[in-house]
Image (cartoon, helix red, strand yellow):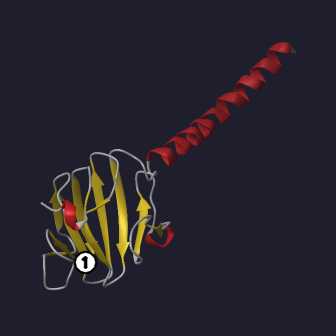
Amino acid sequence: MKVVAVTSILAVIAVLAPFAAQERAKEKSDRDILVVKPAAIKWEKAEGMPDGVWVCHLTGESDAAPFVDMLKFTRGTRIPLHRHTANHIVTVMSGTMVLGREGKPEEGMGMEIPAGGYARLTAKTPHWTFAKEDSIVVISGDKEHDLHWIEKSEKK
């Protein structure tokens, strides 16, 4: 009788084991790959930035280093002259952004970056940005994403 019971238990385990393995594999793949559709992106007001700037931290945390953030700009948003500690790659996903090195962010000044284009900024390079259209950009950097406003006395 004990042999029949043990055999029955082993048979049940053998039948259920592939399902348990599939479930463990599914749980692992859910951690290894994350897909987020546009409507499900969780935008939050970008702290310390002017109105019209929203952020989603793709690396998961605002203080991640290195980091990848996605920012959304409302048309006409101007970000005054500033710099960052990290080297940056800025890829424009939609809309058109304008990037400048001196003065104030104005239309007709600076360099336009259309959707599909990118800019590379060396650490501590002063720059400003202007959203010519509603725009979404992805910014990556090799250190924590910080922001330092540049006062007139700080300009070289």
Q: Position of residue 118 (x, y in %)?
A: 18, 65
Quick one: which residue is furthest to the right in this view? Answer: 1
Q: Amino acid at mark 1?
A: Phe
Q: Nearest the camera: 58 or 73?
A: 73
- The residue labelled by disc 1 is 130
Helix, strand or loop at mark 1 = strand
Q: Going 23% across and 55% down the picture, which residue do you hit?
A: 88
User: The C terminus is located in which quarter?
Assistant: bottom left
Vertical side of 38 occupied by 20: above or below: above
Question: Would you say 60 lies left or right of 156 here?
Answer: right
Q: Position of residue 112 (x, y in %)?
A: 15, 77
Q: Going 20% across and 83% down the picture, which residue do you hit?
A: 106
Say how many tags the image has.
1
Question: Would you say 46 lies left or right of 107 here?
Answer: right
Vertical side of 132 occupied by 88: above or below: above
Q: Going 30% across and 45% down the picture, which residue do you hit?
A: 143
Q: Nearest the camera: 13 or 102?
A: 102
